[in-house]
Amino acid sequence: MFYKQLKQTKMSDEKINIDNNTKFDINIKWLIQIISFTVVAAWGYFDINSQLGELKYETMRLADEMKMNSEFRVKWPLGQLGALPDDAEQNLRLNYIEKDIQKHQSLLEDLQYKSIKRDALEDLESHAK
């Protein structure tokens, strides 16, 4: 009905005056569809906006993690970020093993020296007889 009035108004080149007493007829079906469309559009807008916000936050978090990982990847092998407790224990054990090996090497050298000295004395004794 409103459409018919608008069409007739355009045809007759009359101006439409809108004021406090303006009335128009609209089908309830169309009104429900307009309201439904508006609600769905608003819901869709806010859903998309929320997802964009989450993606921005996730991107910032991942960029920060990548920066920290790059720093870790460079500094960890250089020992600038410390060591694991297991590494410290392992290093301590290795130090003890190295000391034991050095002690055993010095004992072995002493035995070799004494063996050489004894062989030399035996040779001297055998030549002296």
Image: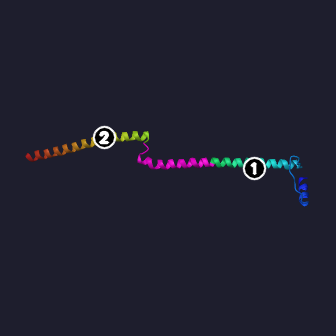
x 43%, y 48%: residue: 77
**Left or right of 97, for residue 56:** right
State the residue lying farthest toward the left.
129
Determine which quarter of the picture holds residue 8. Answer: bottom right
Give me the residue at 73% from left, 49% from top. 44
Q: Are marks 2 and 1 in contact (CB under 8 Å)?
A: no
Disc 2: CA contacts within 10 A as few (<14), some (14-19) or many (>=20): few
Question: Mark 2 or 1, which is nearer the eye?
Answer: 1
Judge left or right: residue 77 versus residue 20.
Answer: left
Going by the numbered disc 1, the residue's amino acid type is Ala
Q: Position of residue 122 (x, y in %)?
A: 14, 44
Percent x, y of residue 62: 56, 48
Instruction: Compare residues 74 and 127 and report the one nearer the observer.
Output: 74
Residue numbers of the magenta segment: 55-82
* Residue 24 image point, x, y percent: 89, 49
Which residue is labeled 2 in the image? 99
| Labels 2 and 1: the sequence-earlier one | 1
In front: 69, or 6?
6
In the image, 124 versus 106, the foreground residue is 106
Q: What is the secondary structure assignment of the residue under circle 1? A: helix
Q: Residue 41 carries which label?
A: 1
Residue type at the position of mark 2: Lys
